[in-house]
Image: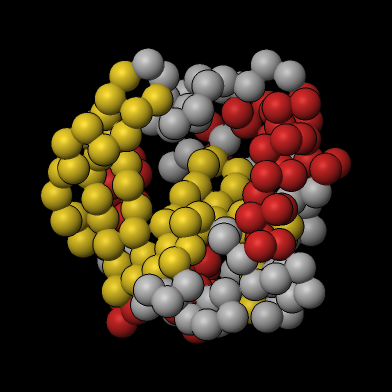
Amino acid sequence: MTATSPFPLIETDRLLLAPLADSDSEEVLALFSDSRVLEFYDMDVFTRKEEALAWIQKHRMRFDVGDGIRWAIRYKGQRPLLGTCGFNNLAGQGHSGEIGYEISPANWGNGVATEAVRAIIDWAFLNGFNHPLRRIVARIMLGNEASARLLKKVGFQDEGIMKRAGHWKGASHDLRIFTLPSNGGNGGAQPVNC
């Protein structure tokens, strides 16, 4: 994707995945100021709206240069932000990307994350970033069992543990690596303007 490519909107049965806007900064601040959301995340709790705005702008820039994409997750026809999801570390020739997502605690356990993740996987394998992805990777901290269950539910395989593969919040972390090859798409997403 480049700055001239339109940002893809994705609809599922219940959700609309659309670009994050600067006007989402208050809701992004609320999401990332909750320590439960960031328990297994490689960043510190947000305390200022400017941090949320910088995070949104960072993801917009990643889209503009073709290195990533981040969607706002909302129920169709509703404004409140449920969370975000997307891909980072896109490797052009390798046709791979790393998936990430976070959902507000008020929406944990109601299938929002599963529905959104399935939708972006389908989009990535069918359309992708100027080319369909062939492989998606997820790296999660040990102990993040909710994320491990979600990844397995949508078809990812647990590839094992990479020792000391992450370093944040003043400590090194072992990470579980999950992968999904392109033959593992799950169907169900309806691209709106891909």
Asked which quadrant contains residue 22, the reply is top right
Q: Quadrant of residue 190?
A: bottom right
Q: Position of residue 123 (x, y in %)?
A: 53, 75
Q: Residue 177 location, x and y as percent?
A: 24, 50
Q: Residue drawn 26% across and 55% down?
A: 178
Q: Is residue 38 left or right of residue 181?
A: right
- Nearer to us in this view, 34 or 86: 86
Image side of residue 110 versus residue 146, left or right: right
Camera-nearest residue between 113 and 173: 173
Rendered location of residue 131, percent (x, y): 52, 82
Return the x and y of residue 113 as percentages of the image width and height.
Answer: 48, 51
Left or right side of 4 for 33: left
Q: Is residue 68 above or below residue 6?
A: above
Quarter of the image holding residue 147?
Answer: top left
Quadrant holding the N terminus? bottom right
Taking the view exactly as shown, the residue that stands out farthest to the right is 23
Q: Against 7, is 33 above or below?
A: above
Q: Does residue 118 appear in this view?
A: no
Q: State whether residue 95 appears in this view.
A: yes
Q: Nearer the viewer, residue 15 or 99?
A: 99
Q: Is the image coloured rainbow, by chain, by secondary structure, or in one colour?
A: secondary structure
Q: Residue at x 27, y 62 (%)?
A: 179
The total number of labels drawn is 0
Q: Residue at x 63, y 21 (%)?
A: 46
Dividing the image into 4 quarters, which one contains the C terminus?
bottom right
Identity of the residue drawn at 52% across and 66% down: 120
87 to the left or right of 77: left
